[in-house]
Image (cartoon, rainbow, N blue to C red):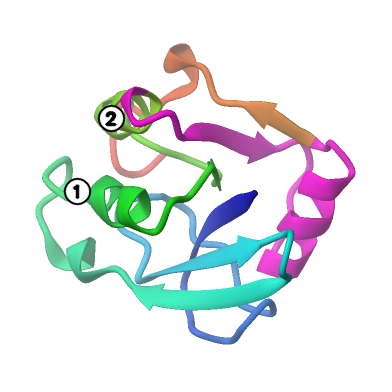
Amino acid sequence: MKICIPVVEDNDIQSKLSGHFGSAPYFLVYDDSSEDVRVVDNSNDHEAHGQCMPVNLLKDMQVDIVVCNGMGLRALENLKNMDIRVFRPLEQYLTAEEIIAAAAEGKLQELAPQDACSHHHH
């Protein structure tokens, strides 16, 4: 399974979690079968709010799930339409490493449409 985590820096699994999906400067993708870590630049981070489309990048990378603190409804629906599930941590985690461990321990909650962000600063 490939897990995507929006992060604010390129610091391998010590990268800090971004507050929001679409405006994250980077995406860390972790493959739990190979333990491979890849950090990719999110070129959408300078787009107007609601206009970024990083979901296509994640589809191309064959991501299975996204784990983030917040996401807009449009992005959530687009990911769902691509069979990419979206989760949020049950506790506050700061690094990708902590998120990966929480995923392995089942400490994630699937994001429902009513949980989506309706504005940029939530």
The relative height of residue 85 versus residue 27 in the rendered view (above or below) is above
Report if residue 95 is visible in the image: no
| Residue at the spot 62% in from the left edge and 37% down from the top edge | 88
Residue 78: mark = 2
- From the viewer's perspective, is residue 58 above or below residue 121? below
Residue 8 rendering spot, x and y as whole percentages: 46, 73
* Quadrant position of residue 109: top right
Q: What range is drawn magenta here?
A: 81-107
Q: Which residue sits at x=89%, y=43%?
A: 105
Residue 33: horizontal and vertical position, in percent? 74, 60
Give the camera-side residue of 15 and 49: 15
Q: Spatial distance from mark 2 to mark 1, Cα to Cα? A: 9 Å
What residue lies at 25% left-to-right and 28% top-to-bottom? Answer: 74
- Asked whether the residues under the numbered discs 2 and 1 touch, taking CB atoms below 8 Å apart as contact, a structural biologist would say yes
User: What's the amino acid at mark 1?
Assistant: Met
Quickly name the residue at label 1: 53
Left/right placement of residue 91 relative to residue 70 reads right
How packed mark 1 is, by other alpha carbons closer than 10 Å (few <14, some 14-19, many 20 or more), is some
Q: Is 56 left or right of 102, judged from the image as shown?
A: left
Residue 122, x across and y down, in percent? 42, 38
Check disc 2 and report its element: helix, strand or loop: helix
Give the image location of residue 81, x and y in percent. 32, 23
